[in-house]
Image (tube, rainbow, N blue to C red):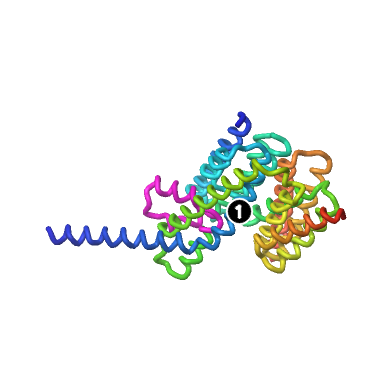
Amino acid sequence: MLSHKADFDSLIYHRTVLNWLFMKHGAVAILPLAAGAALYGFAFGLLAAQVGFPWWGVALMSGVVHAGSSQIVAVEQFAGTSAVVGAALAGAALNLRYIGIVASLSDVLSGLSLRMKLLAIHITGDENWALTMTERAKNPAIRASFLIGSGLVMITVWTISTTLGAVAGATLPNLEQFGLGFAFTAAFIAMARGLWRGAPNLLPWAMSFAITVCAVTVGAPKAYAIVAGAVCGLVISHFHRTKKERVA
Amino acid sequence: MTFPFWMLIVVLAVAALSIRVLGLFAGDAIKSSQYSWVLDDLPGLIVVSLVASSLAGQSVETWIAAGIALVVAYLSNHVILTMCVGVAVYGGLVWVGF
């Protein structure tokens, strides 16, 4: 009986050590990506401060939302129109990809309590998700602790960098004239490049671009123009797939 | 910080968590359904629409800088590099009064 208890304790001990090691591994492996996010976060903090957010408001948003591109889009839209629902809708729409991202983590998160799962999905971002999936492909023993370790680093770096940007932004003149606003346009162009999957994307993307430009040009709020453009692109994509299936 | 600022943070936080929880509980079902392609296509379409909304009605230098950023993005597939080159080109064009 005593031996069984000792074996059980030993097993728990080794499992705990293993989890800590994976967490540490994740925290270290994510550092290069976190450095890039810090630059991006600093720029976002500057923008948010120029819109009128205090530094602690930026810190609060980064901590409780933790969705870089969504925050940027929402604040950009909010700056232009002050329409809370439209801005939040645009930001949330961009975050829809997380349905697929989180769904793909079901194996990684299995065995965790609901509380730990909620923590893990909150600190999951594009970077630490991609890194976890890549590492897991190489080593199937990689577990949720790797995701959590890398995620804790990412949310910490994101919150600190955006806050520092907001502190600096409050003391600087309007940076829009120096191209800060364009920084995010350029970043989204690069993100689009990363999402490009070849010729089948061409027509839906062209339609989304054209519809959005037309909608904004005729005076529609940007947040709604974005949603209209994306929906039209989905419709074109649906027709394209249906046609392809019929031919096949 | 006024009420609209608070509302934006709260609504965005609730939306972000809801989407993640939806992924946790329903993501598998959506991915295995006939509509799984929507999850694949939507991110790219949203990003393209975002770029379009940023460029609509903007100056010629903005469109030129965007074109150069597109070339850099295509060649490098690197977000930070594209951002830095794009801002430098845009800033340069504005500075010389293009």
Bin the neighbour count of mark 1 within 10 Å (Cα to Cα): few under 14, some 14-19, many 20 and up: some
Which residue is rendered at x = 74% and y = 48% of the image? A229
Residue A121 position in % (x across, y down): 48, 50
Most distant residue in the right direction: B98
Image x and y of residue A56, in percent: 55, 39
Judging depth in this view, the residue of B74 and B38 nearest the camera is B74
Residue A148 percent location from the top left of the image = 44, 55
Corner quadrant of residue A58? top right
User: Image check: A88 left or right of A104?
Assistant: right
Q: Nearer the viewer, residue A130 or A210?
A: A130
Image mark count = 1
Confirm whether residue A61 shows in the render.
Answer: yes
Q: Which residues are magenta?
A: A101-128
* Helix, strand or loop under label 1: helix
Q: Is residue B25 above or below residue B69?
A: above
Type of residue at label 1?
Leu
Predominant secondary structure, magenta span: helix
**Residue on which disc 1 sits:** B39
Q: Which image quarter: residue A143?
A: bottom left
Residue drawn at point x = 45 percent, y = 55 percent: A106
Query: Is A93 positioned to the left or the right of B57 in the image?
Result: left
Q: Specify the quadrant that holds the N terminus of chain B.
A: top right
Please name whichever residue, B62 or A121, is drawn nearer the observer in this view of the structure.
B62
